[in-house]
Structure formats: C-alpha cells, structure tokens
Amino acid sequence: WLIPRLNLLPYLEKPPLVYWLTALSFTVQGESEWAARLPAALSALGGVFLAYGLGRAFWGPAVGLLSALILATCGGYVAMGRLITLDMALTLFLNLGVGLGYLALSRERPRLWVWAYLALALGVLTKGPVVLVLAAVIWTAWCWRQGRPWLRSWLRPWGVALLAAVCLPWFILASLRYPDFLRFFILEQHLGRYLTKAIHHHQPLYYYLPVLLGFMAPWSLLLPWALGRERPGRDPDRLFLFIWAGAILLFFSISRGKLAPYILPALLPLALLLGQSLWDQARSSPGFSGSRGLLITLVIWALLAWGLLGLYLRPPALVIPLLAKGELLAPLFLPGLLVLALTPTLALIWRRPGVLVAGAFLLSALVPWGMEQVSTQRSPREMGLALRSQWQPGAALVGYRLYSQGISFYSGQVFHLLSFSTELDYGRKLAGTTSLFFDTSREMAAFVRTRPLVFFFLRVEDRASLEQELPGKFHFLARQKNSILISYGEESLRARENAKKNKQPAGGRGSY
C-alpha cells in the first residue's frame, strides 16, 4: 500500500491516491471491471454535483441544475468517466479546490479555504504538484484583474501547512525507500513532460481546441454564442470562469507533451458559463425571441447536422472511405445524426432550452454504446480471458517487444519481457536484478526451455522473428487489432485442442 506496483515492480510515475482507491474498491467488491472503474465514475459524478453547487452559489439553483446537466451530457466527460485513468479524479480535486477557493475569495467565506486546500492536497496525491500550479495561476489572475493583492489574497500559511501534512508523508517515505524518486518524479515526469518531447506526446499548439470542442459535444456548438453574448468583466463570476477555463487551455497548450484528457478540468467552468447563458436568456426573453445570436447558432447547428445526415444517407465517393474507417461505429451513425439534427430543429420550433438538454441526454447515452462497439477491437478483455482459460501450472507469459496492463488484469498473470522501453523501466531500475526481464533473445530462449508452456504476446509482424529465435510449433489463441497471443511448448497441444472446440483458428502463421 505504500509503494504502488505494476507487474510486481515499483511504479512511481504518479502518486498513489487513485491506486489506493482502486485497491480499496477491489478489497470491498472483488477484482472486476466494475470495481476498477468505480473511482473514475464516482469522480465524474462528484464533478457533476460540484457544477450544481457552484452554479447555485453564483446564480441560483436553476443555473446550478442546468450547468450540472450540461456537464453530465458532454460526450467527452461521459467517456472519461468510464475509463480507468487518473484524469477524472484530478479534475474533481482541482476543480473542487479552485471553486471553493474562489467562493472564499469572492464571498468572504474564509472557512472554505480549509476545504479548498484539502482538495488541492488530494489532487497532489493524485497526479502531482501541477494542481498547485494551476490553482495559483487561476486565483492570481483573477485577483490581479480585480485589483486585489494577488498573493496575500489566497496564500494562507496554515493552508501550506495543511498541504504539507497531507502530502509530504508519502513523498518522504517514498524518497526514503528510493532516494532517486524525487529527481525522477519532478524532473522527468513533470518538468520533462512539460518542457521537452522526451515522453513522445508532442502535438501542435492548437491541439486542445478541437479536443475541447469534441469533449464538450454536443454543447460545443453553443459555446461561441455563450462566450460572446456579454463582456466577462461585467460579472465577476463570469470573469472568473473565463480565467479558469482559459488558464487550463493555455497552460496545457504551451506544454510540449499533450494528451487529450489533460483538458478535462476546463469542461466544468465552460458548462457553468453555458448554463448561466441559457438560463439568463430563457428568463429574460422566453422562447429565445430576444437572442438573435442564439437563434442563428441553432439554425447553423441544424443545417450542419441535416447536411451530415444527408452525406451519410447518400455518401459521395470522397466520403465512403471515411465511413469505412468508422465501421465499428456504423450502428451509431444514423441514430446519432438524427438526434443531432432534431435537437436544434425542435428547439427552434418549441423554443425551450429543455429540448436541448433532452437531445444532449440522448446523444450522451450513445457514448457507452459506442465505446462498447470500439472495445471489440481495442479492449484486451477477450485476449486476457483466453489466456486465463488456457493457463496451466508452470506456464509463463512473455511480452515479445510488447506489453499490456489490460492482459495482466483480465488474466491475472505477470509479464516476463524481452527488454524494450515501457512504463516499467523506472521500476526495473529500482528493483535491480529481476527475472522478469530478458536483455537478449538468448536469455529469453533459455527461460522458455525451463517452462512446459509459454504464452507470447506480440505484434503480428514480429511472429516471424520469434519463430526464427525459437524452433518448434506455435499455436494461435487470440488476436486484438495488430497484436496476437500464441502458445509454445508441449503443453500447447492442449491449448490447440481447446481452441478448436471454441472454433478459434489454431496452428500455422496464416491461421489468423
């Protein structure tokens, strides 16, 4: 519980809070997909309640409810709430800390600082000090814009003490266990990711603009209207939300290493801005009659959606290859485009914001369905379960220039790896000598000869190379996109017979 482990090796790329929560979920419910996804799902739900609470504090319960519904129906938010990553928990703790800190600043409620600093401390234990940097930038920018002392307004000595009391024990213990930890954690995993291309996540400066629009869909179509309907300086709460979302977008856009989920914290302030804009418009001029900008936006939305539907129903030659690439999602295209087109159309006819919410709910309900469709090729579930069903005493699992956490989860087995760069590299360095890695193919071959049955996980194109290094018969078990699972050894004959019973191909190289 002190040091997280991955494939039996120390794993210190990230702090342990989400891993602790996942382990606790496993302890209570047993190891299952549901238990593994529960921390991310609860974090997403917590973010929805936070949107309601902040919207209510700023503009009343109606805006809070509408903002919460908007956030809960953003396609990217729904998807990330189902994935096992640290990003949703980070989003919750960062936004909770920033939001409570702003209420303490703007409403003169100093007791809220305790909870704000505590939330940020949990954020540090989730993904590191980036949480503190973002919160400081957001609060400082708002204080400067309001002409308030930018540091004295939010920096509390006892808050720093609270942060230290919550965060430092684990960092100190990890450093005592592994003296090189802080250098690796700060210089490589934070500064290195942010300032260099070393982690291989380089993207252009504008990368997060389309990502943000995609994550906010379908509400992103209304964002230009909501953000431009009034000057942010007229309302200090709107100004703060602009600063909040803008600081996150700018901070991660400047970073040399970019991944789509990093932008998740910006969705909540944008949902609040959109919820306030829609409610204010509905209250001041029922039926959207007083907002030419909103009406024009809905018309453009409807025209685009109906046009896309037409292209889908009668695709020209240029569109057919694009549809073929998305064949896994083909069952979603027609219902998705219909709802996307009917939502603004009916909103224009009935002039009620509730129509937009209903349409967004229907579209967000398609997201889990779409993820299930995609998982048939992207998820390692079937491969891991196939390995579990064929496992025998004395068997081993070898990753031949390839590694998958998912296969370990579904099979319950540990990988032996032919040496190549993975997220296990630093753990291998800390562990010192370990039998889990082979530096050469000769070492791997010697290990294989000591086991009655070995399963290999590798890319399809690497099978010929493996067969040259290990004479004998290999039997195909499963495939996931461009990776395959094959067995090797005398006992693999039994695996081959089981594969035949399950009507799976087994045998030669051409059988998959």
Image (cartoon, helix red, strand yellow):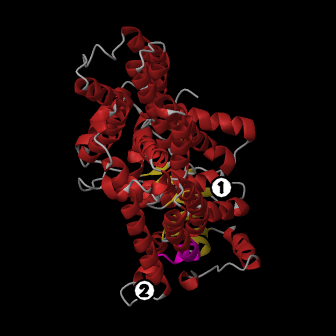
Of all residues, the one furthest to the top in this rendering is 158
- Specify start and end residues of the magenta stretch as a single range: 326-335
Whether residue 334 is in magenta: the answer is yes
Whether residue 30 is in magenta: the answer is no
Crowding at label 1, few (<14), some or many (≥20) Cα neighbours within 10 Å? many
Instruction: Decide: is 137 above or below 306.
Output: above
Q: Quadrant of residue 454?
A: bottom right
Is residue 279 or residue 380 the one in the foreground?
279
Magenta segment, prevailing SS (helix, strand or loop): helix
Q: Where is residue 271 in the image (x, y as percent from the top left)?
A: 45, 45
**Horizontal relation, residue 221 to residue 505: left or right:** left
Instruction: Decide: is 117 above or below 15.
Output: above
* Secondary element at tag 2: helix
Q: Which amino acid does label 2 sit on?
A: Ile
The residue located at (41%, 43%) in the rendering is: 273
Is residue 40 or residue 342 the one in the foreground?
342
Calculate the distance from the C-alpha at mark 2 to the C-alpha at mark 1.
Answer: 39 Å
Q: Are marks 2 and 1 in contact (CB under 8 Å)?
A: no
The residue located at (43%, 83%) in the rendering is: 311
Instruction: Decide: is 136 above or below 414.
Output: above
Residue at numbered disc 1: 411
The residue located at (45%, 13%) in the rendering is: 162
Disc nearer the start of the sequence (2/1)? 2
Residue at numbered disc 2: 320
Q: Where is residue 164 in the image (x, y as percent from the top left)?
A: 42, 15
* Secondary element at tag 1: helix
Q: Which amino acid does label 1 sit on?
A: Ser
Is residue 358 or residue 424 the one in the foreground?
358
**Horizontal relation, residue 209 to residue 196: left or right:** right
Image quadrant where one finds the C terminus: bottom right
